[in-house]
Image (cartoon, rainbow, N blue to C red):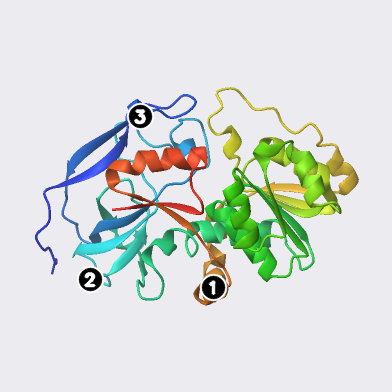
Amino acid sequence: MTDTPTLPAVSREWHLASRPVGWPKPEDFAFVEAEVPQPAEGQVLVRNKYLSVDPYMRGRMSDAKSYVAPFELGKVMQGGAVGEVVASNAEGLSVGDHVLHFFGWREYAVVGAKNAVKVDPDAAPLSTYLGVLGMTGLTAYAGLLRTAAFKEGDTVFVSGAAGAVGGQVGQIAKLKGASRVIGSAGSDEKVKLLKEEYGFDAAFNYKDGPVAEQLRAAAPDGIDVYFDNVGGDHLEAAIGSLNEGGRIAVCGMISVYNNTEPAPGPKNLARLIATRGRIEGFLVGDHYDLQPQFVQEVAPWVASGELKYRETVVEGIENNLEAFLGVLRGDNTGKMIVKL
């Protein structure tokens, strides 16, 4: 029997109105009201409580061929979300359950039961399932341990280190025995966070001078692993400091997402020959088999306080776009979350 309590008639949601060229502009989006549908058989209706905004979403706003389908013009966008089931027409999910799903950028979402993952709000705050215990956390875990093949004693450099993924990469590396962890960030406040709260051995503000020079000063003996969230001058600097057998895991390149012309590649790729270095890109979707291992290992670190995390919380669905633009600007410390 369908459980359908009284619900509001409309849900507010964000549509892509036009494909941005360069930096996204407010006129590229539309904030609209839509009718709240009833769940069909096998579906639930979720009132979203927290929404995720992430750098990769900029790529989905373009129609260029990519690893994921672009957002459709005139239709609601998507993103990670966690919320409460308010109507159910699916076995195994009841009103009052909390679920993680991928239909964000809206207040209410109809979700197929197979696309909803039940989460426990008593085990961890709901917002963490979008960050430290969610996709961003798994991205850090898989990229460092599988793609970059981290091993005890490695020196690790992380760009965008005060972001949701980067901060977790550095801390996991320390917890697993890295000899030295270095991070780059875009403000002195974030550098202080990396060193004083996250336990990085060294950190620098990339705006203070050439990244290559600052990295050499922070890692005079070179680096074994580079976790790349930024690309550009950071990637070139990492190649320049790579030790023999070094590994580079390319997670993102936020420095070039809004470019309208192709960005020049690193000028020192030939150095990979001498170092026998390796660069490998990865997508978290290829590593969901690690999810149980990830939660088993990381959740106790979060509960004990050994692994710290930050969230930047923006209130209100009407501010979802501004929160997303803030991620592209680097306004966030840790995971950017929209609270509804």
Q: CA distance from mark 3 to mark 1?
A: 39 Å
Q: Amino acid at mark 1?
A: Gly
Q: Amino acid at mark 2?
A: Ser
Query: The N terminus lies in which quarter of the figure?
Result: bottom left
Judge from the rendering whether residue 49 lies leftward or rightward of residue 125; answer left or right.
left
The crowding category of the residue bearing disc 3, from other C-alpha atoms within 10 Å (few below 14, some 14 to 19, many at least 20), is few
Q: Closer to the observer: label 2 or label 3?
A: 3
Compare marks 2 and 3 and give the one earlier in the sequence.
Answer: 3
Residue 229: percent from the left, percent from the top?
61, 46
Residue 92: percent from the left, percent from the top?
28, 72
Secondary structure type for disc 2: loop
Q: Amino acid at mark 3?
A: Pro
Write the residue at 75% across / 33% down.
266
Write the residue at 56% across / 54% down.
165
Direction left: furthest residue: 6
Judge from the rendering whether residue 36 lies leftward or rightward of residue 141; answer left or right.
left
Write the residue at 74% across / 65% down.
178
Q: CA distance from mark 2 to mark 3?
A: 38 Å
Residue holding disc 1: 305
Q: Closer to the observer: label 1 or label 2?
A: 1
The circle on residue 269 is: none
Residue holding disc 2: 94
Residue holding disc 3: 26
Judge from the rendering whether residue 263 lies leftward or rightward of residue 100; answer left or right.
right
Q: Is residue 143 above or below residue 261?
A: below
Residue 192: percent from the left, percent from the top?
62, 54
Compare marks 3 and 1 and give the one earlier in the sequence.
Answer: 3
Kindly indicate whether the residue at mark 1 contacts the one at mark 3 (C-beta within 8 angstroms): no
